[in-house]
């Protein structure tokens, strides 16, 4: 369903005089500086040592130690109101991750190309052609049908459960991703209970038979009682991959291979409760089943996370809170695979886990937004001040790795997703991060803000798995300014 949408825009324009359209969406631009993105003192690239076990990130062209980049997020979400019982909803965007980077679509022009070397160099002096052939894409397109007992969503749509740690609708202004269903969801409401069975075909690449399909099916059951300020729920689902599907890959051995047949079960538990000024919520996702040929043979999957979020409201302006959690990692014992990866929209800090820093050296093949909280035990102490226009957040995050390499044993590199044999023992200290965020709500639609993060880097990131090649951890910081519109 990912197509150039000229046909869709034409359809909207021809029907615009007959059907009302509600236009929603978001657009934002940010600028980022990550000082010492490799988090080590050394200034030469030695990332290839250690037999696949080194945590060192490769240096980018020019061997700069800092990363500077600007990104944008864009999505247009029209709602066509067909009648009282039906709507058509869509999301249009461009690039990867609902946007991209400033300058990522620059192309060589005829003014400076080798095919026209005698032309002038006007475009070098004052660029007038910096746009490539990026298409406008359909990320969501579905019908929503309404009846007395249920709402039916049919097509490509998104969904949310609990804290959004595993399945996330991506409704926030700066959310780059969303959980997607190519299929249907039926939302039933029975008093305070909400029941939603669903079916999705995640992939039919390879053939139009069941031999290459990836499908998902399951249901959510949620009890929500606003009067008692309490909610709890269960998501139960399964994801099945056929033996001949070739979309999902593993590079755990250093080369790419298809996972093949897989059957993963998802159980996600959620609970939320408020007691006057105190509120807390917890989510416990558990994954099990068969993940496929991740170690060259059919492998069991056993991954889980326990997440807690809480706030205590002092008055109308101040509140304090605590978050904590454990997200399982992989020990490479090969008896099962146990690494849990949370949704990339669900983040715990401004710098730790927020960006895929391997993209600094390879921005054309790796996205900075494909970064997942994983393999961590963390504790977050936070406070927030809010006024009519301003919001300030301060947080301190302490993080330790759940699994690390131990000398003489098989191990798993969570940075590169590769298994290796450990010759050195790795520290579990990820570090301590201090974050400050501010947001100014200019009006109902426009906001301007900034994020600052300072990471006291732990020795986990200095690991090389090579006694002759040692690294020293170096503190790192993030500076970000951003402006966005959500309408």
Image (spheres, rainbow, N blue to C red):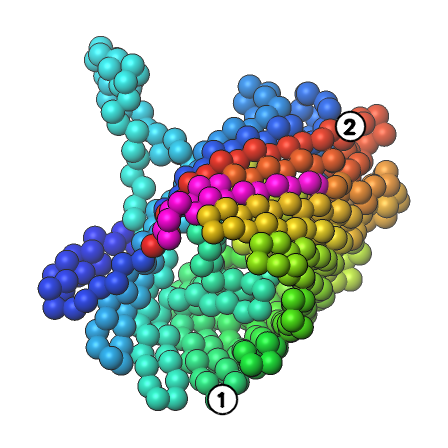
Residue in the foreground of this view, choosing between 36 and 405: 36
Residue for badge 1: 191
Badge 1, how many Cα within 10 Å: few under 14, some, many 20+?
few
Q: Residue at x 37, y 57 (%)?
A: 139
Farthest residue toward the front? Answer: 315
The answer to whether residue 291 of the structure is visible from this angle is yes
Give residue 346's position: percent from left, percent from top.
58, 55
SS label for mark 1:
loop
* Precedes in sequence: disc 1 or disc 2: 1
Which one is in front, 163 or 6? 163
**Side of 386 relative to 171 (left or right):** right
Side (left or right) of 15 relative to 445: left
Looking at the rendered image, the disc whose residue lies closer to the viewer, 1 or 2, is 1
Residue with the mark numbered 2: 471
Q: Is residue 28 left or right of residue 5?
A: right
What main secondary structure does the magenta stretch of the protein show? strand
Point out residue 329 in the picture as x, y percentages from the top left corner: 73, 55
- In magenta stretch: residue 439: yes
Considering only vertical position in the picture, is 143 above or below 72?
below
Q: Position of residue 398 (x, y in %)?
A: 75, 47
The quarter of the picture where the C terminus appears is bottom left
Q: Nearer the viewer, residue 256 or 287?
A: 287
Q: Distance between the Cα atoms at labels 1 and 2? A: 59 Å
Segment colored magenta: 433-449
Residue 480 included in the magenta stretch of the image: no
Q: Position of residue 360 (x, y in %)?
A: 55, 32
The residue drawn where x is 85% and y is 30% is 467
């Amino acid at each position: 369903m990912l197509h150039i949408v000229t046909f869709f825009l034409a359809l909207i324009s021809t029907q615009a005089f007959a059907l009302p359209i509600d236009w929603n969406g978001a657009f934002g631009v940010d600028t980022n500086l990550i000082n010492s993105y490799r988090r080590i003192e050394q200034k030469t690239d030695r990332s290839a040592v250690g037999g696949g076990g080194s945590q060192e990130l490769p240096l980018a062209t020019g061997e700069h130690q800092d990363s500077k980049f600007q990104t944008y997020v864009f999505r247009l979400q029209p709602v066509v109101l067909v009648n009282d019982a039906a709507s058509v909803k869509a999301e249009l965007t461009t690039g990867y991750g609902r946007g991209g980077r400033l300058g990522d679509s620059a192309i060589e022009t005829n003014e400076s190309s080798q095919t026209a070397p005698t032309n002038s160099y006007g475009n070098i002096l004052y660029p007038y052609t910096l746009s490539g052939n990026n298409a406008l894409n359909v990320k969501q397109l579905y019908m929503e049908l309404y009846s007395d007992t249920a709402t039916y969503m049919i097509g490509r749509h998104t969904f949310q459960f609990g804290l959004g740690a595993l399945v996330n609708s991506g409704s926030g202004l700066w959310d780059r991703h969303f959980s997607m269903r190519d299929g249907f969801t039926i939302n039933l409401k029975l008093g305070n209970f909400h029941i939603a069975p669903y079916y999705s075909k995640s992939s039919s690449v390879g053939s139009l038979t069941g031999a290459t399909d990836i499908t998902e099916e399951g249901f959510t059951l949620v009890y929500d009682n606003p009067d008692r300020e309490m909610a709890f729920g269960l998501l139960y689902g399964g994801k099945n991959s056929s033996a001949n599907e070739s979309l999902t890959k593993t590079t755990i051995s250093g080369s790419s291979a298809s996972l093949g047949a897989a059957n993963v079960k998802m159980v996600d538990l959620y609970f939320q409760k408020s007691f006057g000024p105190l509120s807390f919520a917890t989510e416990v996702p558990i994954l099990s089943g068969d993940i496929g040929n991740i170690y060259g043979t059919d492998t069991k999957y056993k991954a889980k996370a326990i997440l807690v979020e809480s706030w205590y409201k002092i008055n109308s302006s101040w509140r304090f809170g605590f978050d904590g959690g454990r997200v399982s990692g992989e020990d490479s014992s090969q008896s099962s695979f146990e690494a849990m990866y949370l949704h990339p929209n669900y983040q715990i800090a401004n710098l730790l886990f927020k960006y895929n820093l391997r993209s600094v050296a390879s921005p054309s093949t790796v996205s900075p937004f494909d970064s997942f909280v994983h393999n961590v035990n963390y504790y977050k102490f936070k406070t927030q001040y809010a006024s009519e226009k301003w919001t300030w957040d301060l947080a301190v995050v302490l993080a330790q790795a759940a699994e690390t390499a131990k000398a003489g044993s098989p191990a798993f590199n969570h940075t590169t997703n590769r298994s290796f044999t450990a010759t050195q023992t790795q520290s579990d200290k990820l570090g301590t991060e201090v974050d400050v965020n501010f947001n100014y709500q200019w009006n109902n639609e426009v906001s301007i803000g900034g994020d600052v993060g300072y990471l006291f880097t732990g020795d986990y990131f200095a690991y090389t798995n090579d006694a002759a090649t040692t690294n020293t951890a170096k503190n790192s910081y993030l500076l970000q300014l951003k402006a966005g519109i959500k309408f």
